[in-house]
């Protein structure tokens, strides 16, 4: 197995020979310019400092991507490397589904025009596909949580490849040993070059860039062949398949399959039916809003726990996640209006039919069965294969 080894150049962020390319990337600088216009870094409030650090994170990502282009060029074991940013030559804004470049010149997988996942970089070896995640945040918890979805999606799209990840972080990052074993972790110095940051804010170039990476291994995202994954139609298939009941109940064996374990990581929750307003009010008598629909899901709470969770669409348009735990404690959380779950329930409401409605007794039986429920484990969870400092 080929090991990814960090170079001293990458470790120390020695960027002199790639610096010019950084000025051709697409940056959102309007807000940053207004923040820095009358303020020094030392005087920024927390919100402004967060915006500045986010911009630094963008620059860091582009620096690492430039290093990876060189790394791919000089390492024969890398067979394909997907171009993005100024190095690629098309924007797939009219394509509905597939691996493509979006308007921000990033690598994304879309389904029905909806971004399902974004990848900082993607490259292939003979038998493996690596996705790359880069971050300047010292806390890695949220990054770690995103990995399962990306891993599972790529496993669906490229079932014959080993799926691996390269994680690139800065010195002082925590939680390195919590990454899954398919990860290789590189650690670099912090990006502290404020002179470079300010030049990128005020002097970005827009035209006349020609990529030097013309070797045949450097490819456009749209040329990569992969299995087709249709996000919303798959949700519909799962709902209908789950309701092919065994002894009058949801067939949990269906959810234990290898394919469904991947879907749990892509979606987190899988829709199994609907609940009447009357039944829901019996379960949650103090619910304080008028209800349009109640969606019943099996949700992956964590790597070992699954439970029935309700998504309640109110007449006023708000969507709430409602969970009743084993102690009958009710937790209610608002969902973001522009989040994935809101898009999902807008699609699922067209599938509301009497045959998919559950009653309280069915749900109680299902909750009991879920206490012993386990999917086919597809994602290695032990410590990462390499940590390069």
Image (spheres, helix red, strand yellow):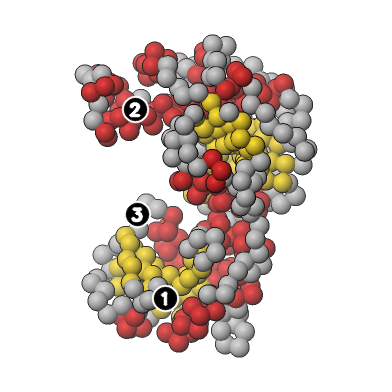
Residue 43, above or below 104: above
Q: Secondary structure at mark 2?
A: helix
Q: Secondary structure at mark 3?
A: loop
Judging depth in this view, the residue of 276 and 8 nearest the camera is: 8
Percent across and percent down for residue 191 are 45, 22
Q: Earlier in the sequence, mark 2 or mark 1?
A: 2
Q: Earlier in the sequence, mark 1 or mark 3?
A: 1
Quarter of the picture holding the C terminus: top right
Percent across and percent down for residue 11 are 57, 23
Q: Secondary structure at mark 1?
A: loop
In the figure, residue 120 lies in which quadrant?
A: top right
Q: Nearer the viewer, mark 1 or mark 3?
A: 1
Q: Seen in the image, is 4 located left or right of residue 345?
A: right
| Label 1 neighbour load within 10 Å: few <14, some 14-19, many 20+ | few
**CA distance for labels 2 and 1:** 44 Å
Q: Residue at x 66, y 24 (%)?
A: 71
Q: Which mark is residue 52?
A: 2
Judging depth in this view, the residue of 8 and 362 nearest the camera is: 8
- From this viewpoint, is residue 28 visible? no
Q: Marks 3 and 2: CB-CB under 8 Å? A: no
**CA distance for labels 1 and 3:** 26 Å
Q: Residue at x 49, y 29 (%)?
A: 171
Q: Seen in the image, is 72 located left or right of residue 359?
A: right
Residue 226, above or below 89: below
Q: Nearer the viewer, mark 2 or mark 1?
A: 1
Q: Residue at x 43, y 70 (%)?
A: 309
Q: Residue at x 64, y 16 (%)?
A: 212
**CA distance for labels 3 and 2:** 25 Å
Q: Which mark is residue 326?
A: 1
Percent across and percent down for residue 358 are 46, 82
Percent across and percent down for residue 334 are 32, 60
Residue underneath mark 3:
336
């Amino acid at each position: 197995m080929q090991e990814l080894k960090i170079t001293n150049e990458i470790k120390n962020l020695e960027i002199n020979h790639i610096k010019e390319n950084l000025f051709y990337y697409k940056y959102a600088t309007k807000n940053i310019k207004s923040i820095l216009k009358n303020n020094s870094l030392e005087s920024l409030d927390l919100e402004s400092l967060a915006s500045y650090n986010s911009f630094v994170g963008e620059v860091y990502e582009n620096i690492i991507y430039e290093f990876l282009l060189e790394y791919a060029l000089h390492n024969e074991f890398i067979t394909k490397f997907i171009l993005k940013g100024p190095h690629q030559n098309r924007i797939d804004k009219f394509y509905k589904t597939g691996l493509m470049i979006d308007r921000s010149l990033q690598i994304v997988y879309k389904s029905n025009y909806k971004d399902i996942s974004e990848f900082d970089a993607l490259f292939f070896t003979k038998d493996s596909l690596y996705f790359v995640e880069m971050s300047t945040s010292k806390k890695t918890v949220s990054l770690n949580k995103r990995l399962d979805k990306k891993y599972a999606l790529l496993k669906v799209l490229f079932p014959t490849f080993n799926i691996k990840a390269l994680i690139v972080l800065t010195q002082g990052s925590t939680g390195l040993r919590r990454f899954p074993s398919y990860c290789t972790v590189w650690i670099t110095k912090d990006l502290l070059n404020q002179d470079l940051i300010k030049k990128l804010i005020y002097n970005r170039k827009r035209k006349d860039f020609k990529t030097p990476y013309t070797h045949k291994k450097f490819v456009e995202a749209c040329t990569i062949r992969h299995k087709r994954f249709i996000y919303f139609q798959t949700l519909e298939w799962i709902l209908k398949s789950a309701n092919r009941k065994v002894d009058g109940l949801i067939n949990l064996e269906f959810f234990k399959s290898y394919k469904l374990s991947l879907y749990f990581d892509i979606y987190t929750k899988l829709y199994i039916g609907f609940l009447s307003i009357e039944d829901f009010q019996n379960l949650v008598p103090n619910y304080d809003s008028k209800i349009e629909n109640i969606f019943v899901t099996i949700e992956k709470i964590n790597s070992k726990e699954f439970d029935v969770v309700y998504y309640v669409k109110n007449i006023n348009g708000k969507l709430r996640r409602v969970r009743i735990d084993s102690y009958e404690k009710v937790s209610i959380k608002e969902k973001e209006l522009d989040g994935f779950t809101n898009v999902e329930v807008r699609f699922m409401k067209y599938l509301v039919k009497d045959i998919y409605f559950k009653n309280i007794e069915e749900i109680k039986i299902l909750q009991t069965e879920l206490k012993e429920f386990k999917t086919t484990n597809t994602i290695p969870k032990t410590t990462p294969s390499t940590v390069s400092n």
